[in-house]
Image (cartoon, rainbow, N blue to C red):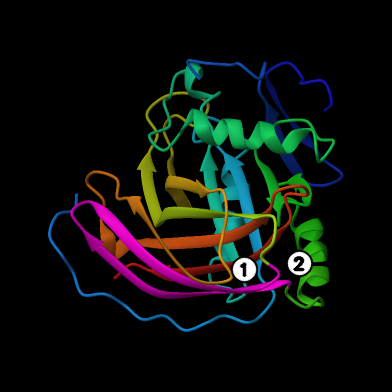
Amino acid sequence: MKKILRACCFSLPLLTVSFCTPSSPGAKDKGHTGELPSKNIQMITKNIAVLELFTSQGCSSCPPADRLVGTYTKQENVIVLSFHVDYWDRLGWKDPFSSKEYTKRQYNYASPLNASVYTPQLVINGQTEMIGSDANKISSVLHKIFSEQPDAVLAIQNVNPQNRKLDISFNATGYTGNSIVNIALVDKKTTTAIKAGENGGITLTNYNVVRNFKTINEVNAGNNVSEIDIPGKADLKNMSVVIFLQQKETNKISAAVQVNIL
């Protein structure tokens, strides 16, 4: 892992992108009830690209990346996950979507990818990292992914929200050995008026914001069932669930699927 740079924001004119770095790995200060009808979901067989954006409402370099990944939420074979980290919370604005667990996920990628930790940082399919506003590099990586055949396929068969939990049944085929299952509940679109910090005075829109995240250490070939807690005050009409397989040794994401809850 490269040395973490001192906290700052700066631009890279040649790339027309910018990013911010945290001060240290340990940086701090940094409802639904009732039962609804279940849903049957069709299988997706194309190779899927999962874009994990590590971002923060407290970082002035992040809004361009937030907007860029937002354009990919409309693309059928791309799944966006916006993980809001917490190490910028100490600079005057506490991101309401930030979590130390999402910061930990970002740091867990750093050493395998031989990368620094910064915002906005984008990791694609667990294998390639880049500045989240670097449109040309993102396009190049996606082109390569889409030219390949998927290692595995996921199909969500049923989602059923009840008693503040989402019950999920899904099917996994193809290569599932030595893989974990990640489940994310996301708000498809959020708008926040920022009142302080580097982005104070502006209104930010974020896309596919991760509200809850769960990892299961193994997956069965064939049918699987799981559940995940629904965050308080959640608007289920604005939420979707993402499930993706990730290989334990390489972090490669081999299959993914996203569906709306309602």
Res 60 visible: no
Q: Nearer the viewer, residue 221 or 39?
A: 221
Is 24 located above or below residue 193 in the figure?
Answer: above
What residue is shown at x 66% (from left), y 22% (from top)? 22
Q: Quadrant of residue 59?
A: top right
- Residue 142 is labelled as 2
The question of residue 212 being in magenta is answered with: no
Q: Horizontal placement of 236 versus 34: left or right?
A: right
Res 163 visible: yes
Please identify the quadrant where the N terminus is shown: top right
Q: Which residue is mark 1?
A: 78
Residue 172 is situated, as x and y percent measured from the top left of the image, at: 57, 72
What residue is shown at x 52% (from left), y 82% (from top)? 43
Q: Nearer the viewer, residue 49 or 108?
A: 108
The question of residue 153 being in magenta is answered with: yes
**Range shown magenta:** 151-175
Please identify the quadrant where the C terminus is shown: bottom left
Q: Earlier in the sequence, mark 2 or mark 1?
A: 1
Main secondary-structure element of the magenta-colored stretch: strand
Residue 183 is situated, as x and y percent measured from the top left of the image, at: 48, 55
